[in-house]
Amino acid sequence: MDQLHAYWRMEYIDSPRFPDGDRPFTELPALNDDRAALIVHRSPLCYLMLNRYPYNPGHLLAIPFREVNDLDELTSDESADLMAMITLGKRIVQAAMKPDGFNVGFNLGSAAGGSIPHLHGHVVPRWNGDTNFMPVLGQTRTLPQALESTWEKLAATAVELTNAS
């Protein structure tokens, strides 16, 4: 049997989980520490953060500050801001990481894969050839970059892009 050595993963496994409560998408912004919360950018009604359990490096979540469970619960302003954040998130990841494509969408309800009952959109960068045997056969994802390194890159790009606008 071949062995997969990923010694760097122990640091991730031992790291504290933020936050400890049941409502992470309302509690994380309240930390007022965007680096620890992995928040890349804030707008008046929504924010962008790195997914702590990403499908690929740079996997962002676009989240309204107000806790709602479905798209039809958003106000018109929240809906517009959320879409603007998804678009900005795509621009940030494109500029910083140069993926070949994106998956963008929502998991609405637990049957659709929604694991946290607070509406959030996904912006997942994709590269040609990024799918391999590990998730299919080994039920394991391999990520070539640590979350902190990805946050630094995306947060700096977010500042550049929003200041240029």
Image: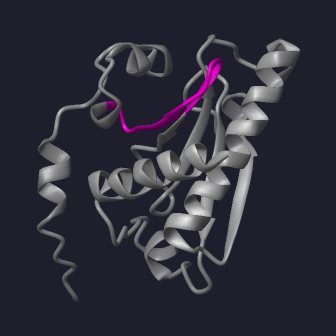
What residue lies at 11% left-to-right and 68% top-to-bottom? 7
In-image side of 49 versus 11 (left or right): right
Q: Position of residue 5 (x, y in %)?
A: 16, 76
Q: Decide: is 32 above or below 128.
A: above
In-image side of 47 versus 151 (left or right): right
Looking at the rendering, which quadrant does residue 31 occupy?
A: top left
In-image side of 32 versus 77 (left or right): left
Q: Decide: is 89 above or below 138.
A: above
Q: Which residues are magenta?
A: 37-47
Locate the N terminus and report the quarter of the image it occupies: bottom left
What residue lies at 51% left-to-right and 52% top-to-bottom? 160
The one of 25 and 82 positioned closer to us in this rendering = 82
Residue 108 visible, this orientation: no
Residue 116 visible, this orientation: yes
Q: Is residue 45 magenta?
A: yes
The one of 111 and 164 positioned closer to us in this rendering = 164
What residue lies at 40% left-to-right and 72% top-to-bottom? 138
Q: Position of residue 161 (x, y in %)?
A: 58, 51
Q: Position of residue 82 (x, y in %)?
A: 73, 30
Q: Total marks drawn?
A: 0
What residue lies at 62% left-to-right and 84% top-to-bottom? 128
- Looking at the image, the residue that sits furthest to the front is 164
Q: Is residue 12 magenta?
A: no
Looking at the rendering, which quadrant does residue 118 occupy?
A: top right
Q: Position of residue 93 (x, y in %)?
A: 56, 60
Q: Decide: is 49 above or below 116.
A: below
The one of 152 and 4 positioned closer to us in this rendering = 152
